[in-house]
Amino acid sequence: MSEVTMVLVGAGLRGMTYTRRALATGAGRVVAVAEPDPLRRARAAEEFGVPPERLYAGWSEVAAAGKLADACVIATQDRMHVDPAVALADLGYHILLEKPMATSEDHASAIADAAQRNGILLAVCHVLRYTSYTRCLKGLLDSGDIGRLVSVQHLEPVGWWHHAHSFVRGNWRRADTSAPMLLTKSCHDIDWLVHLFGRLPRRVSSFGSLTHLRPGDAPPGATDRCLDCPVEAGCPYSAKRLYLGCLGDADQEFWPLSAVTGEHTEAGVLEALRTGPYGRCAYACDNDVVDNQVVSMEFDSGATCSFTMSAYTPMEQRRTRLMGTHGFIEGDGNTLRLVDFRDGSERTIDTRTRATANPGPSPEDGHGGGDEALTDAFLAAVAAGDASLLLSDAAESLATHRVVWAAEVARTTGTVVELDIDGGVLTTA
C-alpha cells in the first residue's frame, strides 16, 4: 500500500490520535498542520516532522495554499466542521472527519453534498463500527444466529468524572456553544444501533434533562473553585483529585489532562485549576446539556430499540442486550453471551481473543480499537481508491445524524417524530 499524504486540521486530542496511528503504521505521512493554538501547532510539527512553511494558523490558510496532500483529518471544534470540510472537499482532499459530522442538519447536508459532487471519500469517525467486538456481533446478527432481531436495549455509561470533565466544565457543556449531548457524545451510539439493524427507524421518541450538577444541588459550604473549597475532599467531582491524579500516567496525561493544561507538573495543574475552566466547582458552571437521556426507536419491521445515556456510572464499555426470534445476545464491549432458544445451548465469545488471533486493534485501545481500525481503513481506502473499505459514507452518516436530530425534536417537544425515509435499508459495505 502506498503512503498517503495528509494535512491535519485541528491538532487536539482526536486529531492527534488519528494522525499518530497513521504514522505508527507507516500508512500515512503528515505534510501540513493547521492549528490556531501555537503550542499545539509547534508540538504537532515537531512530532510529525512538518517544516515551518507548512504550518498554518487555520484551515483557510491551508485551503489558500491549494491541494497539498491526498487527504486531510478535520478535528476542529464541532461547530467549525462545515467550512473546512466543504472547502477542502472542493480542492479534492479525501476527508476523515471527526464526529459529529456537523451541529446542524443544513451544515451536515452541505458536507455530504460537497463529498458527492467532488467524488471524494469522506469518513465520519463513527469508530464503534470498526471494533472487533462490533464486527463479531454484526456477523452473528447477519448470519441469523438469533433469528430476526426484535428488540435491543443499549446503555452508554458516560462516567461521572468524564461527564464533569467534558460536559460540565469542558467544551461540550452547552448546547448553544456546542450542541446537544445526544449529538456530541451519543451520535456514536445511535449510528452503531442503526448499523446493527441495517436500516433506519421509522419513529423516534426521547426523554431527558439535566438533573444534577446545578447550583441548587451544591453541597453546603461549597465554593466556586475546588482549590479553596472546604468540602472538596469529600466531593465525587473534585477537580483537584481528578487532575492531580493524572500526573505520572502517560495515558491520563494525554487525556484528560492535556485538555486542562500543557504543563504536566503539580504546579502547572494547580495554576490551571486556579485560573481555568476545569478548576470550577461542578455545581457552579454554566452547563445546560442533559446528564441522562432515553431514546426509543421503532422500525418498519415492528422491532424496537431503547438507548440510555447516563452520566452517573463508572466510565466503562457500553452494555447491550439483543433479543431475536431464535436467541438472545448480551454484550459488554468485550464478550458476547449467546443463548440459542432452539436447543437451549449457551456460549460466550471473547472478542479480545479473536483480536489477538487476528492481529489488529484490540478492545483495550481507543474506543475498543475503533480509532485505530477506522484510521487504517480510511488510509487503505484512499490508497486503493476503494470506498468499499469504509463501513459508512457521507450519505449514511448524514442519515444516522438525522435520527439524532429527530430524537432531540422529540425530547424538546414531547412528541413522537416520524422520519421521512426512502425504504430505510442501509446498503453501504
Image (cartoon, rainbow, N blue to C red):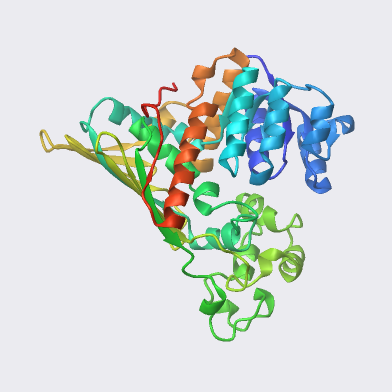
| Image quadrant in which the C terminus is located | top left
Foreground of the two, 39 or 361? 39
Q: Is residue 266 left or right of residue 61?
A: left
Q: Position of residue 143 (x, y in %)?
A: 27, 25
172 is higher (above) or lower (below) than 95: below
Name the residue at the left extreme.
343
44 is higher (above) or lower (below) than 62: below
Count of numbered badges drawn on the protein: 0
Q: Is residue 163 left or right of residue 201?
A: right
Q: Is residue 193 left or right of residue 22?
A: left
Which quadrant holds residue 94?
Answer: top right
Which quadrant holds residue 74?
Answer: top right
Name the residue at the right extreme.
53
Residue that appears at 20% across and 31% down: 147
282 is higher (above) or lower (below) than 58: below
Q: Is residue 39 left or right of residue 179?
A: right
Residue 313 showing in the rendered view = no
Q: Position of residue 324 (x, y in %)?
A: 21, 37
Foreground of the two, 194 or 235? 194
Q: Position of residue 361 (x, y in %)?
A: 50, 33
Q: Position of residue 68 (x, y in %)?
A: 79, 22
| Image quadrant in which the N terminus is located | top right
Which quadrant holds residue 100?
Answer: top right
Residue 389 showing in the rendered view = yes
Residue that appears at 71% across and 23% down: 90
